[in-house]
Amino acid sequence: MVIGYLVDLFTNAARPSGPILAMSIVLLVIVAGVVATFLVLMRQGYRWVRTLLTGGAVAAVVFSATGLFTVERPAAAATAYAAAVIFGSVLIAGGVFLLHRKDAHEFFTR
């Protein structure tokens, strides 16, 4: 999903100026860091993190799917964006499915 965002950011017809581009990349790094921190906390058994990650996953898949069909992109950028978003959405959906299986409920104790 990060690759899809970067493809969209750099190939957009209305390419943002330097400071806006830099702030977008910094925000992307911060969000990726927060998600990585949540994944570490989830591995330690916190149930509330699983809930937050599930909500974020659903929002990311919906946002990416709508962006897949509503935004005009050049052919190469559209192909790269579609490949990254579809692959990322499948991985996210699989992860959410595995997080909510019956045997996974026993792991989350806190």
Image (spheres, rainbow, N blue to C red):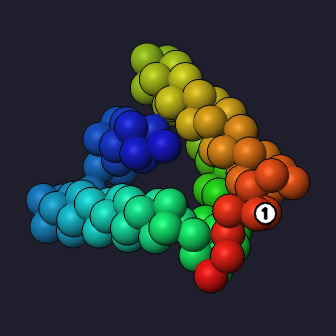
Residue 62: % across, % down: 72, 54
Residue at numbered disc 1:
105
**Residue lying furthest right in this view?**
102
Q: Residue furthest left?
A: 18
Which type of secondary structure does the marked residue at label 1 adopt?
A: helix
Foreground residue, 48 or 3?
Answer: 48
Question: In the rendered view, does 37 fall on the left or right side of 57?
Answer: left
Question: Residue 37: horizontal and vertical position, in percent?
Answer: 37, 67
Left or right: 29 in relation to 2: left
User: In the picture shown, does residue 12 fall above or below 62?
Assistant: above
Which residue is at the front of the view, 61 or 19?
A: 61
Seen in the picture, residue 47 relative to 69 is either above or below; the reply is below
Please name the residue shown 41% across and 63% down the image: 40
Q: Do we see residue 76 in this rendering? A: yes
Which residue shows up at 63% across the image and 30% down it?
Answer: 86
User: In this picture, is 37 found above or below 104?
Assistant: below
- Residue type, label 1: His
Instruction: Estimate how packed mark 1 is, as few (under 14), some (14 to 19) or many (20 or more) residues with alpha carbons within 10 Å.
Output: few
Q: Residue 108 vs residue 106: left or right?
A: left
Residue 63 visible in the current orientation? no
Task: Name the one closer to the observer, 103 or 74.
Answer: 103
Q: How many marks?
A: 1
Query: x, y (%) of residue 68?
Result: 65, 38
Q: Residue 92: percent from the left, percent from the top?
A: 64, 44
Asked where in the image residue 70 lies, by quadrant, the reply is top right
Residue at 16% from the left image edge and 62% from the top image edge = 22
Please tell me which residue is depicted at 62% across the width and 82% down the height of the picture.
110
